Amino acid sequence: MYTTDQYEGILAETVTLPGANGDWINAFFARPLGKGPFPGLVLAHHMPGWDEWYRETTFKFALHGYATITPNLYFRAGHGTPEDVAAKVRADGGVPDDQAVGDLAGAMQYLRSLPFINGKVGIFGTCSGGRHAYLAACRVPGFDAIVDCWGGNVVMPPEALNEKRPVAPIDYTKDLSCPILGLFGNDDTSPSPEQVNQHEAELKKYGKDYEFHRYDGAGHGFFYYIYKAYRHEQAMDGWKKVFAFLEKHLSSRAN
Amino acid sequence: MCTMIVEKVKIEGSGKGASGWFKLEGANVSYDHPFDAPYEHALNIDFVNESLGPSARVAVELSESAARALVQTILNVLEQAEAGGHLAHR
């Protein structure tokens, strides 16, 4: 916990790294200054893109002691304002799951290559990023904890599957290799409370280490102070749960 | 990207974006998360020219009722134009 007599320094900058298929993509990277060791964290940005909220959140996790990297999952769509790029991706039906997973794996490997990481790397995502984070944590070895905030389309009916999204993430649950924290709003429609229940049942079925919290009076995206969806009380409690979970599973002291 | 409901249509015309007027080549219509409108999902229309890059975009984000009213209004205006013989030149 920060106290006012501490030295604090953060380095935050754009970096590049090899993502899916070895393609070079850019990423926003923020880390505490010093030799560490620090736990690592990969952020999977949401549908509105590699936007200011995600760059702020990257910085926020760094303030809390995590070397945090947010790859630009929309890099291949071209460049412009985050909204314009995200609108193009939205029109194209999103990015392919394999590509997103490859980019997130690349970010994890980038962190693991650094000399100041404590050997543990988590992943955090919201909205489509929660879904992408879940896919990565199930399909790629090397993540030690996952935080899924209201990831939609984890549960998918067969008719919703397509070339870009050929497998419902819930069907990878048996392969999940790390503990998961899930935060959801009971007024959300994607994922709906019923879908969250299905996801939880699948985690229970395979004996996974999970912690799900459901909030009344909250819908989709209740952390986003930039949107009307923001719910102060639920968001503050949710952030406490996020930091407690990450401390438990990624801290050098706890392990 | 939570509903994934989107359709693209080729269109002709001009749009005025942040850098001025540009030639339109398409419209992307989605019912998904908006960037600004205060709804979880909105009827989003992006008038675009992809050959000019992601920034060649004129965006609107509408409530469902606004979108339906807009569609009906466009049809009404076109009907009046047709009745007045104004479409004969095309």
Image (cartoon, rainbow, N blue to C red):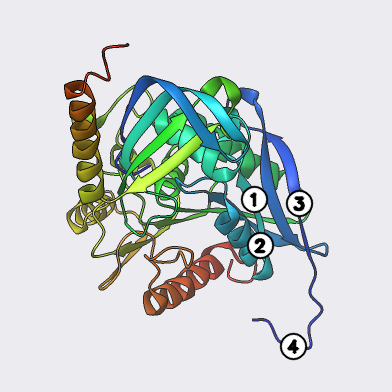
Q: Within the image, what quadrant is residue A6 found in?
A: bottom right
Which numbered dot is residue A13? 3
Question: For the residue labelled by badge 3, is the local secondary structure a helix, a strand or a loop?
Answer: strand
State the residue position of label 1.
A69
Which chain letter matches label 1?
Answer: A
Q: Is residue A234 above or below residue A25?
A: below
What distance separates the C-alpha of mark 1 from that of mark 2? 9 Å
- Crowding at label 2, few (<14), some or many (≥20) Cα neighbours within 10 Å? many
Q: Amino acid at mark 1?
A: Ile
User: Image quadrant for the C terminus of chain B?
Assistant: top left
Q: Is residue A63 left or right of residue A166?
A: right
State the residue position of label 4.
A4
Which residue appears at 44% of the width and 72% of the height?
Answer: A241
Are tags 3 and 2 found on a single chain? yes
Q: Position of residue A22 (x, y in %)?
A: 64, 25
Point out the frontmost of discs 3 and 1. 3
Question: For the residue labelled by badge 2, is the local secondary structure a helix, a strand or a loop?
Answer: helix
CB atoms of marks 1 and 2 within 8 Å: no
| N-term mark: 3 or 2 | 3
| N-term mark: 2 or 4 | 4
Q: Is residue A126 above or below residue A36?
A: above
